Image (spheres, rainbow, N blue to C red):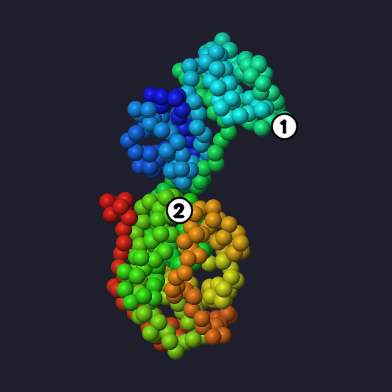
Amino acid sequence: MASQDGRLLIIHFGELWLRGKNRRSYIQALKRDISERIGSGFTLVDDYDRLIIKSLEGGNIDLITEPIRRTFGISAYEIARSTIPDLKSITRTSISMLKASGAMSVKINSHRSFKGFKFNSIDIIKSVAAAASKAGIEPSLEGHDTELFISVKEKEAFVYIGRMKGSGGLPAGTSGKCVVLMSGGIDSPVAAWYAMKRGLYPVYVHVHGFPSASEVRSSKIPKIIDVLSGFSKSHKLYLVPSHVFQLAAMKSRRYELVLMKAFMLRLAEKIAVLEGAGAIVTGESLGQVASQTLPNIAAEQHGIKLPILRPLIGMDKQEITDIARRIGTYGESIMPYKDVCSINARNPVTNSNLTEFNRIAKEIGLQGIVSRSVKAAEIEYSDRESDR
Protein backbone atom coordinates (compact mmCIF):
# COMPACT_ATOMS: atom_id res chain seq x y z
CA MET A 1 0.00 0.00 0.00
CA ALA A 2 1.05 3.62 -0.36
CA SER A 3 2.08 5.80 2.54
CA GLN A 4 -0.61 7.52 4.59
CA ASP A 5 -0.32 10.73 2.57
CA GLY A 6 -0.52 8.81 -0.70
CA ARG A 7 3.08 9.58 -1.68
CA LEU A 8 5.41 7.17 -3.44
CA LEU A 9 8.64 7.30 -5.38
CA ILE A 10 8.83 6.53 -9.10
CA ILE A 11 12.21 5.43 -10.50
CA HIS A 12 13.34 5.54 -14.13
CA PHE A 13 16.34 3.52 -15.27
CA GLY A 14 17.21 5.11 -18.61
CA GLU A 15 19.86 3.22 -20.55
CA LEU A 16 19.16 -0.08 -18.77
CA TRP A 17 15.99 -0.36 -20.85
CA LEU A 18 18.20 -0.50 -23.97
CA ARG A 19 20.27 -3.47 -22.78
CA GLY A 20 18.45 -6.03 -24.96
CA LYS A 21 18.75 -9.59 -23.74
CA ASN A 22 20.78 -8.47 -20.70
CA ARG A 23 18.13 -5.96 -19.58
CA ARG A 24 16.62 -8.23 -16.95
CA SER A 25 19.93 -8.94 -15.19
CA TYR A 26 20.78 -5.23 -15.02
CA ILE A 27 17.36 -4.33 -13.64
CA GLN A 28 17.56 -7.14 -11.08
CA ALA A 29 20.94 -5.83 -9.94
CA LEU A 30 19.45 -2.35 -9.60
CA LYS A 31 16.54 -3.71 -7.57
CA ARG A 32 18.92 -5.52 -5.21
CA ASP A 33 20.89 -2.33 -4.64
CA ILE A 34 17.74 -0.26 -4.06
CA SER A 35 16.32 -2.86 -1.65
CA GLU A 36 19.52 -2.76 0.45
CA ARG A 37 19.40 1.02 0.58
CA ILE A 38 15.74 1.51 1.52
CA GLY A 39 15.44 -1.28 4.10
CA SER A 40 12.33 -3.09 5.30
CA GLY A 41 10.02 -0.09 5.65
CA PHE A 42 9.26 0.06 1.95
CA THR A 43 8.22 -2.21 -0.90
CA LEU A 44 9.63 -2.14 -4.43
CA VAL A 45 7.23 -2.82 -7.31
CA ASP A 46 7.94 -3.45 -11.02
CA ASP A 47 5.94 -1.21 -13.33
CA TYR A 48 7.01 -2.01 -16.92
CA ASP A 49 9.74 0.56 -17.73
CA ARG A 50 10.02 1.94 -14.21
CA LEU A 51 10.10 0.93 -10.56
CA ILE A 52 7.84 2.21 -7.81
CA ILE A 53 8.71 2.43 -4.12
CA LYS A 54 5.76 2.44 -1.74
CA SER A 55 6.08 2.76 2.02
CA LEU A 56 4.76 0.28 4.54
CA GLU A 57 3.17 1.26 7.85
CA GLY A 58 3.08 4.91 6.81
CA GLY A 59 6.84 5.18 6.21
CA ASN A 60 8.37 8.51 5.23
CA ILE A 61 9.31 8.66 1.54
CA ASP A 62 11.50 11.74 2.20
CA LEU A 63 13.98 9.61 4.15
CA ILE A 64 14.98 7.57 1.09
CA THR A 65 15.34 10.27 -1.56
CA GLU A 66 19.05 10.86 -0.81
CA PRO A 67 20.00 7.13 -1.00
CA ILE A 68 18.03 6.91 -4.26
CA ARG A 69 19.81 9.97 -5.68
CA ARG A 70 23.15 8.22 -5.07
CA THR A 71 22.14 4.90 -6.61
CA PHE A 72 23.85 4.19 -9.93
CA GLY A 73 21.54 2.88 -12.64
CA ILE A 74 18.79 5.41 -11.89
CA SER A 75 18.42 8.10 -14.55
CA ALA A 76 15.64 10.07 -12.85
CA TYR A 77 13.05 9.86 -10.10
CA GLU A 78 10.08 11.76 -8.76
CA ILE A 79 7.96 11.87 -5.63
CA ALA A 80 4.36 11.34 -6.70
CA ARG A 81 0.94 11.02 -5.10
CA SER A 82 -1.22 8.02 -5.83
CA THR A 83 -4.94 8.52 -6.37
CA ILE A 84 -8.01 6.77 -7.78
CA PRO A 85 -7.96 6.84 -11.61
CA ASP A 86 -11.02 9.02 -12.15
CA LEU A 87 -11.25 12.63 -13.29
CA LYS A 88 -12.46 14.06 -9.97
CA SER A 89 -9.76 12.38 -7.87
CA ILE A 90 -6.98 13.21 -10.34
CA THR A 91 -8.10 16.84 -10.53
CA ARG A 92 -8.44 17.19 -6.75
CA THR A 93 -4.99 15.68 -6.13
CA SER A 94 -3.42 17.86 -8.87
CA ILE A 95 -4.79 21.10 -7.44
CA SER A 96 -3.78 20.14 -3.91
CA MET A 97 -0.19 19.57 -5.07
CA LEU A 98 -0.10 22.79 -7.10
CA LYS A 99 -1.32 24.85 -4.16
CA ALA A 100 1.23 23.24 -1.85
CA SER A 101 4.03 24.04 -4.33
CA GLY A 102 3.12 27.73 -4.51
CA ALA A 103 2.70 27.55 -8.30
CA MET A 104 1.57 30.69 -10.15
CA SER A 105 1.46 29.12 -13.61
CA VAL A 106 1.58 25.51 -14.74
CA LYS A 107 2.12 23.32 -17.78
CA ILE A 108 -0.01 20.18 -17.49
CA ASN A 109 1.18 16.88 -18.98
CA SER A 110 -0.95 13.74 -19.03
CA HIS A 111 -0.33 10.16 -20.15
CA ARG A 112 -2.99 7.43 -20.04
CA SER A 113 -1.45 3.96 -20.40
CA PHE A 114 -4.79 2.20 -19.77
CA LYS A 115 -7.25 3.01 -22.56
CA GLY A 116 -10.37 1.48 -20.96
CA PHE A 117 -11.64 4.68 -19.33
CA LYS A 118 -14.22 6.95 -20.96
CA PHE A 119 -11.93 9.95 -20.52
CA ASN A 120 -8.63 10.49 -22.35
CA SER A 121 -5.49 12.57 -21.74
CA ILE A 122 -7.04 15.70 -23.27
CA ASP A 123 -10.02 15.42 -20.92
CA ILE A 124 -7.64 15.17 -17.94
CA ILE A 125 -5.69 18.26 -19.01
CA LYS A 126 -8.92 20.26 -19.55
CA SER A 127 -10.31 19.26 -16.15
CA VAL A 128 -7.13 20.12 -14.26
CA ALA A 129 -6.63 23.35 -16.25
CA ALA A 130 -10.15 24.54 -15.41
CA ALA A 131 -9.70 23.78 -11.72
CA ALA A 132 -6.28 25.47 -11.72
CA SER A 133 -7.76 28.66 -13.21
CA LYS A 134 -10.41 28.73 -10.49
CA ALA A 135 -7.66 28.37 -7.90
CA GLY A 136 -5.75 31.34 -9.35
CA ILE A 137 -3.08 29.24 -11.09
CA GLU A 138 -2.65 30.03 -14.77
CA PRO A 139 -2.44 27.04 -17.18
CA SER A 140 0.28 27.81 -19.72
CA LEU A 141 2.34 25.96 -22.31
CA GLU A 142 5.08 28.59 -22.22
CA GLY A 143 6.43 30.83 -19.48
CA HIS A 144 5.17 28.57 -16.70
CA ASP A 145 6.95 28.24 -13.34
CA THR A 146 5.73 24.70 -12.60
CA GLU A 147 5.24 21.52 -14.62
CA LEU A 148 2.65 18.95 -13.53
CA PHE A 149 2.73 15.32 -14.70
CA ILE A 150 -0.18 12.89 -14.57
CA SER A 151 0.20 9.19 -15.35
CA VAL A 152 -2.99 7.09 -15.44
CA LYS A 153 -2.95 3.31 -15.08
CA GLU A 154 -5.81 0.82 -14.78
CA LYS A 155 -5.99 0.76 -10.98
CA GLU A 156 -4.35 4.02 -9.90
CA ALA A 157 -3.07 7.34 -11.16
CA PHE A 158 0.18 9.10 -10.27
CA VAL A 159 0.51 12.87 -10.01
CA TYR A 160 3.84 14.62 -9.54
CA ILE A 161 5.57 17.96 -9.98
CA GLY A 162 9.00 18.05 -11.60
CA ARG A 163 11.57 15.30 -11.92
CA MET A 164 14.88 14.86 -10.11
CA LYS A 165 18.02 13.75 -11.94
CA GLY A 166 19.56 10.48 -10.75
CA SER A 167 23.22 9.45 -10.80
CA GLY A 168 22.78 7.52 -14.06
CA GLY A 169 25.26 4.87 -15.14
CA LEU A 170 25.06 1.14 -14.47
CA PRO A 171 24.03 -0.67 -11.28
CA ALA A 172 26.72 -1.48 -8.72
CA GLY A 173 28.88 -4.46 -9.62
CA THR A 174 27.39 -5.18 -13.06
CA SER A 175 30.75 -4.52 -14.75
CA GLY A 176 32.82 -6.48 -12.22
CA LYS A 177 35.62 -5.26 -9.95
CA CYS A 178 38.41 -2.75 -10.39
CA VAL A 179 41.42 -1.72 -8.33
CA VAL A 180 41.45 2.02 -7.63
CA LEU A 181 44.76 3.72 -6.85
CA MET A 182 43.58 6.08 -4.12
CA SER A 183 45.74 9.05 -3.15
CA GLY A 184 44.90 11.75 -0.65
CA GLY A 185 44.15 14.31 -3.35
CA ILE A 186 41.14 15.56 -5.28
CA ASP A 187 41.52 13.50 -8.45
CA SER A 188 41.47 9.82 -7.51
CA PRO A 189 38.15 9.92 -5.59
CA VAL A 190 36.52 11.46 -8.67
CA ALA A 191 38.05 8.74 -10.86
CA ALA A 192 36.70 6.12 -8.43
CA TRP A 193 33.24 7.69 -8.68
CA TYR A 194 33.30 7.47 -12.47
CA ALA A 195 34.40 3.82 -12.31
CA MET A 196 31.56 3.01 -9.92
CA LYS A 197 29.14 4.87 -12.18
CA ARG A 198 29.92 2.35 -14.93
CA GLY A 199 29.12 -0.59 -12.65
CA LEU A 200 32.53 -1.40 -11.15
CA TYR A 201 32.98 -2.43 -7.52
CA PRO A 202 36.08 -0.66 -6.14
CA VAL A 203 39.00 -2.31 -4.38
CA TYR A 204 41.01 0.65 -3.08
CA VAL A 205 44.80 0.64 -2.82
CA HIS A 206 46.40 3.44 -0.83
CA VAL A 207 50.19 3.71 -0.55
CA HIS A 208 51.17 5.60 2.60
CA GLY A 209 54.36 6.94 4.14
CA PHE A 210 53.56 6.34 7.81
CA PRO A 211 55.37 3.92 10.15
CA SER A 212 52.07 2.05 10.63
CA ALA A 213 48.66 1.85 8.99
CA SER A 214 46.96 3.03 12.18
CA GLU A 215 47.85 6.62 11.27
CA VAL A 216 46.06 6.24 7.94
CA ARG A 217 42.97 4.89 9.70
CA SER A 218 42.68 8.14 11.66
CA SER A 219 43.27 10.31 8.57
CA LYS A 220 41.05 11.66 5.82
CA ILE A 221 41.47 8.55 3.63
CA PRO A 222 38.73 6.48 5.33
CA LYS A 223 36.52 9.58 5.36
CA ILE A 224 36.86 10.03 1.59
CA ILE A 225 36.03 6.36 1.06
CA ASP A 226 33.02 6.71 3.37
CA VAL A 227 31.68 9.44 1.07
CA LEU A 228 32.25 7.26 -1.99
CA SER A 229 30.60 4.33 -0.21
CA GLY A 230 27.34 6.28 -0.34
CA PHE A 231 27.35 5.49 -4.08
CA SER A 232 28.69 1.90 -3.97
CA LYS A 233 29.04 0.52 -0.47
CA SER A 234 30.98 -2.66 -1.20
CA HIS A 235 34.73 -2.12 -0.99
CA LYS A 236 38.02 -3.39 0.31
CA LEU A 237 40.93 -1.08 1.17
CA TYR A 238 44.59 -2.15 0.98
CA LEU A 239 46.90 0.06 3.06
CA VAL A 240 50.38 -0.42 1.61
CA PRO A 241 53.53 1.06 3.22
CA SER A 242 55.86 2.93 0.85
CA HIS A 243 59.13 2.46 2.73
CA VAL A 244 60.25 -0.62 0.74
CA PHE A 245 60.01 1.34 -2.49
CA GLN A 246 61.44 4.58 -1.13
CA LEU A 247 64.55 2.92 0.28
CA ALA A 248 65.25 1.25 -3.05
CA ALA A 249 64.56 4.33 -5.22
CA MET A 250 66.62 6.89 -3.27
CA LYS A 251 69.40 6.95 -5.85
CA SER A 252 67.06 7.48 -8.84
CA ARG A 253 65.91 11.02 -8.14
CA ARG A 254 65.16 12.13 -11.71
CA TYR A 255 63.14 8.95 -12.33
CA GLU A 256 61.66 8.70 -8.84
CA LEU A 257 58.22 10.04 -9.79
CA VAL A 258 57.94 7.73 -12.78
CA LEU A 259 59.21 4.76 -10.76
CA MET A 260 56.71 5.52 -8.00
CA LYS A 261 53.80 5.45 -10.45
CA ALA A 262 55.18 2.29 -12.09
CA PHE A 263 55.45 0.72 -8.63
CA MET A 264 51.83 1.63 -7.87
CA LEU A 265 50.53 0.24 -11.16
CA ARG A 266 52.36 -3.05 -10.66
CA LEU A 267 51.12 -3.13 -7.09
CA ALA A 268 47.56 -2.57 -8.31
CA GLU A 269 47.93 -5.30 -10.93
CA LYS A 270 49.16 -7.82 -8.37
CA ILE A 271 46.28 -6.99 -6.02
CA ALA A 272 43.84 -7.14 -8.95
CA VAL A 273 44.92 -10.74 -9.61
CA LEU A 274 44.35 -11.58 -5.93
CA GLU A 275 40.93 -9.92 -5.96
CA GLY A 276 39.71 -11.09 -9.35
CA ALA A 277 39.51 -7.50 -10.60
CA GLY A 278 39.53 -6.80 -14.32
CA ALA A 279 40.97 -3.28 -14.49
CA ILE A 280 43.06 -0.62 -12.74
CA VAL A 281 41.63 2.89 -12.25
CA THR A 282 43.77 6.00 -11.73
CA GLY A 283 43.05 9.72 -11.36
CA GLU A 284 45.56 10.82 -14.00
CA SER A 285 44.91 13.83 -16.20
CA LEU A 286 47.21 14.18 -19.20
CA GLY A 287 49.98 16.70 -18.57
CA GLN A 288 48.72 17.80 -15.16
CA VAL A 289 51.96 16.89 -13.33
CA ALA A 290 55.41 15.61 -14.33
CA SER A 291 54.48 11.93 -14.02
CA GLN A 292 51.50 12.40 -16.36
CA THR A 293 53.23 13.40 -19.58
CA LEU A 294 52.67 10.99 -22.46
CA PRO A 295 56.25 9.54 -22.46
CA ASN A 296 56.11 9.04 -18.69
CA ILE A 297 52.71 7.36 -18.82
CA ALA A 298 54.06 5.03 -21.51
CA ALA A 299 57.04 4.08 -19.34
CA GLU A 300 55.01 3.67 -16.17
CA GLN A 301 52.51 1.27 -17.70
CA HIS A 302 55.05 -0.71 -19.74
CA GLY A 303 54.50 -4.41 -19.09
CA ILE A 304 51.12 -3.99 -17.38
CA LYS A 305 48.64 -6.49 -18.85
CA LEU A 306 45.39 -5.29 -17.28
CA PRO A 307 43.43 -2.37 -18.77
CA ILE A 308 44.23 0.93 -17.07
CA LEU A 309 41.16 3.17 -16.96
CA ARG A 310 41.79 6.92 -16.67
CA PRO A 311 38.35 8.59 -16.50
CA LEU A 312 39.84 12.07 -15.97
CA ILE A 313 42.47 11.96 -18.71
CA GLY A 314 40.97 14.88 -20.68
CA MET A 315 39.77 17.03 -17.78
CA ASP A 316 41.44 20.11 -16.35
CA LYS A 317 41.78 20.72 -12.61
CA GLN A 318 38.75 23.00 -12.37
CA GLU A 319 36.49 20.42 -14.02
CA ILE A 320 37.71 17.72 -11.63
CA THR A 321 37.29 20.05 -8.65
CA ASP A 322 33.72 20.90 -9.65
CA ILE A 323 32.81 17.21 -9.79
CA ALA A 324 34.52 16.56 -6.44
CA ARG A 325 32.37 19.28 -4.89
CA ARG A 326 29.23 17.83 -6.46
CA ILE A 327 29.83 14.26 -5.24
CA GLY A 328 30.95 15.39 -1.79
CA THR A 329 34.63 14.36 -1.69
CA TYR A 330 36.20 17.80 -2.09
CA GLY A 331 35.99 18.90 1.54
CA GLU A 332 37.97 15.92 2.83
CA SER A 333 40.34 15.84 -0.18
CA ILE A 334 41.76 19.29 0.58
CA MET A 335 42.50 18.50 4.23
CA PRO A 336 46.24 18.32 5.11
CA TYR A 337 47.83 14.91 4.64
CA LYS A 338 51.29 13.40 4.16
CA ASP A 339 50.80 11.97 0.68
CA VAL A 340 53.56 9.90 -0.91
CA CYS A 341 52.36 11.01 -4.34
CA SER A 342 53.65 14.53 -3.65
CA ILE A 343 57.34 13.67 -3.96
CA ASN A 344 59.42 16.83 -4.44
CA ALA A 345 61.91 15.41 -6.90
CA ARG A 346 64.52 17.88 -8.17
CA ASN A 347 64.35 18.28 -11.96
CA PRO A 348 62.07 15.24 -12.53
CA VAL A 349 62.21 13.61 -15.94
CA THR A 350 59.23 14.51 -18.15
CA ASN A 351 60.30 12.60 -21.26
CA SER A 352 61.19 9.12 -20.02
CA ASN A 353 63.53 6.96 -22.07
CA LEU A 354 62.02 3.47 -21.91
CA THR A 355 65.40 1.72 -22.11
CA GLU A 356 66.78 3.82 -19.25
CA PHE A 357 63.59 3.35 -17.24
CA ASN A 358 63.71 -0.44 -17.64
CA ARG A 359 67.38 -0.45 -16.64
CA ILE A 360 66.68 1.47 -13.42
CA ALA A 361 63.58 -0.64 -12.63
CA LYS A 362 65.65 -3.80 -12.97
CA GLU A 363 68.50 -2.31 -10.96
CA ILE A 364 66.30 -1.51 -7.96
CA GLY A 365 64.38 -4.79 -8.27
CA LEU A 366 60.95 -3.26 -8.86
CA GLN A 367 59.06 -6.55 -9.08
CA GLY A 368 60.53 -7.74 -5.79
CA ILE A 369 59.61 -4.43 -4.17
CA VAL A 370 56.01 -4.93 -5.31
CA SER A 371 55.84 -8.46 -3.88
CA ARG A 372 57.26 -7.40 -0.52
CA SER A 373 54.92 -4.41 -0.34
CA VAL A 374 51.83 -6.53 -0.99
CA LYS A 375 52.87 -8.86 1.86
CA ALA A 376 53.21 -5.84 4.16
CA ALA A 377 49.76 -4.49 3.26
CA GLU A 378 46.92 -4.30 5.78
CA ILE A 379 43.35 -4.75 4.60
CA GLU A 380 40.20 -2.93 5.70
CA TYR A 381 36.69 -4.13 4.76
CA SER A 382 33.33 -2.41 4.47
CA ASP A 383 30.42 -4.14 6.21
CA ARG A 384 28.96 -5.38 2.94
CA GLU A 385 32.32 -6.60 1.62
CA SER A 386 33.06 -8.60 4.77
CA ASP A 387 29.75 -10.43 4.31
CA ARG A 388 30.65 -11.61 0.81
Instruction: Locate residue 118: give its quadrant.
Output: top right
- Residue that appears at 34% across and 65% down: 217
Crowd tier of the residue under label 2, counting other residues whose Cα lies within 10 Å: few below 14, some 14–19, many 20 or above: many
- The residue that label 1 is drawn on is 143
- The residue that label 2 is drawn on is 196
- Residue that appears at 50% across and 32% down: 79
Q: Amino acid at mark 2?
A: Met
Quadrant housing the N terminus? top left
- Residue 280's place in the image compared with 41, above or below, is below
Name the side, left or right, on which 294 lies relative to 200: right
Which of 60/257 is in front?
Answer: 60
Helix, strand, or loop for circle 2? helix
Name the side, left or right, on which 388 lies relative to 125: left
Instruction: Locate residue 289: give its quadrant.
Output: bottom right
Q: Residue furthest top?
A: 118
Lower sequence index among marks 2 and 1? 1
Residue 92 x %, y %: 55, 17
